[in-house]
Amino acid sequence: MDSANLNYMPVKGYFSIVIAAILMGSGGIVGTVLFNLGLEPLDVVTLRFSTAALVLAIILACVKKESFRIEKKDILLLMLAAFLGITSLFSLFFYAVQQTNVASASILVYTAPAFIVIISYYKLKEPLSLVKVISLFLTFLGCFLISGGYNFKILQFNLLGYAAGVGAGLSYAIYVVITKLLLTKYSQWTLLLYSLLFGSSFLLVLKPPWRLLNRGFPTEVWVITVYMALVITLLAFSLIWQG
């Protein structure tokens, strides 16, 4: 492979990740639109991920059946990853969006890399250097200040919203550490498939499909739901892995 191709590959990877970040970041804005149409945070998360799970299961059943194969001993770990990476993460995120705003909620989720470093140090025995410690402090401080945490009146009024945002970051961090372990055995598609299947199953227990269908949502809700499932979820994850 020549140097031109070697230079091209990192650029393509970075570009894919940037596009994925933009798509995922738009999820909060789209969620706000659905809130204005009368949906609750749990409604949005349930519709988005149950639709994405159904679509991905159909696609993989047709083109990559081996993605369904898992070992029985890993089911509980996959269920935990699904609960943290889908049910908990996005329920807390959209609640934070509803209680604060899209910008604050998105910034608070970015505490996740700091949590990942801490968890990896204790569970995966990864080294924790002075640079990492300083970075951790600056990460938490930066998220606190940018999200408006310095304004104690706003912080006190929206304390649950801010706590939900940090909780979303922690949920994502634990999910990343678990999937890092599982990636030694399974493909990204297998992990995404079972994250969506188990995660949406947990959500559908709380929001049964017949109750959602009986709500009489306007057509815009279903159009946006399909967009969130296909673009913000499946396409975004595909771009991340391509990167």
Image (cartoon, grey):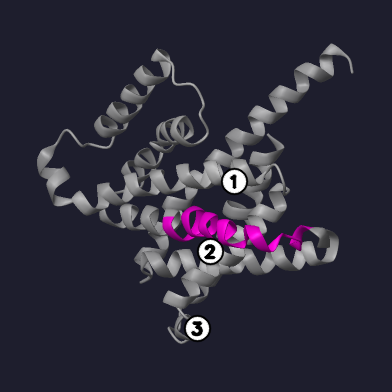
Q: Earlier in the sequence, mark 2 or mark 3?
A: 2
Give the amino acid at mark 3: Leu
The magenta-colored residue range is 67-88
Asked whether the beta carbons under mark 3 and mark 1 sit within 8 Å of each other, the answer is no
Q: Earlier in the sequence, mark 1 or mark 2?
A: 1
What percent of the width, then of the height, locates residue 138? Answer: 32, 22
- Disc 3 crowd rating (10 Å Cα; few below 14, some 14-19, many 20+) is few
Q: Quadrant of the N terminus?
A: top right
Residues at badges 2 and 3 in contact (C-beta under 8 Å)? no
Where residue 119 sits in the image (x, y, percent)?
Answer: 44, 36
The answer to whether residue 226 shows anywhere in this view is: no
Tell me residue 176's x, y (percent): 53, 43
> What is the distance, in whole Å, between disc 3 and disc 1 at their CAs?
33 Å
Kindly identify the residue that appears in the image at 76 percent across and 61 percent down: 69
Query: Label 2, on which residue?
Result: 199
Q: Residues within 10 Å of mark 1 (few under 14, many from 20)?
A: many
Query: Is residue 75 rendered magenta in the image?
Result: yes
- Please, what is the three-letter code of the amino acid marked with disc 1? Thr
Residue 213 disc label: 3
Q: Is residue 50 left or right of residue 26?
A: right
Q: Residue at x 22, y 53 (%)?
A: 160
**Residue wearing tag 1:** 179
Location of the C terminus by quadrant is top right
Is 26 contained in the magenta span? no
In the image, what residue occupies the spot 60% across and 68% down? 51
